[in-house]
Amino acid sequence: MVQFFDLASTPSVPWKNGGGSTRELACWPQGAGMDGFEWRVSVATIAAAGPFSAFPGVDRQIMLLDGDGVHLRSNDGQLDHDLDQPWQPLAFKGDVAVDCAMLGGPSTDFNLMVRRGRWHGGLQVTGHARVAGRARAGLCMVLRGRWRCGEEVLEPGQGLWWSDGTAENALEPLDADPALAWIDLDMEPSD
């Protein structure tokens, strides 16, 4: 199954701590809460310094989309990073307590979370034609330019996600210097 989305019309949910908001693009299984998802992709707006929520057993990847960025530091010292360069993914474990300091004004970031031991996947930025549906699940969102997927033309902030049993769908750039956030997800082999 393929689902199209538009970030501009995706509802924003405020964080409990008041430091930002999140727009969920896809979650598997669909409708799963924060304790029950196997993978989740969202776009968050960070408006104030404060702690990130801990997600035990979850591997996270985060990428700055726009804004001044944030400094992320874990209590155990394993993470000490300025997330200030757009489209450069950073991976870290959701188990650790991470504190976020603002590097200026509000920032928007792209987030991938996968349940460790169940799924694995990666976030990358590409400017080349790709085929959705080759991995078991995944998501892509246009960052720059226009992209064709069948009869659909996707613009920045628009994209699609897919899950098990999806037919392959080619995405082709229509403009010079295109950019697409791309995630392929596969299940971990069972023992």
Image (cartoon, grey):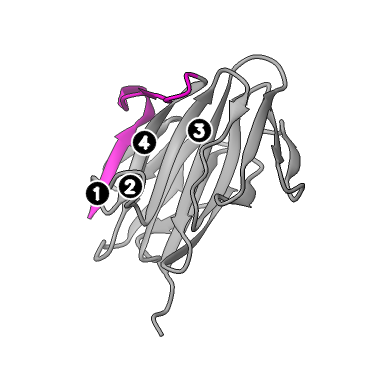
Residue 71 magenta-drawn?
no
Q: Residues within 10 Å of mark 2 (few under 14, many from 20)?
A: many
Question: Relative to 101, is 171 above or below?
Answer: below
The magenta region covers: 1-18
For mark 2, what is the residue? 27
Residue type pointed to by label 3: Gly
Are discs 2 and 1 less than 8 Å apart at CB? yes
For mark 4, what is the residue? 24
Residue type pointed to by label 4: Glu
- Which numbered dot is residue 145? 3
Q: Residues within 10 Å of mark 4 (few under 14, many from 20)?
A: some
Are discs 4 and 2 less than 8 Å apart at CB? yes
Residue type pointed to by label 1: Gln
For mark 1, what is the residue? 30
Q: How many labels, in total?
A: 4
Are discs 3 and 1 less than 8 Å apart at CB? no
Of labels 4 and 3, earlier in sequence is: 4
Q: Is residue 127 visible?
A: no
Quadrant that contains the C terminus: bottom left
Quadrant that contains the N terminus: bottom left
Disc 4 versus disc 3: nearer the observer: 4
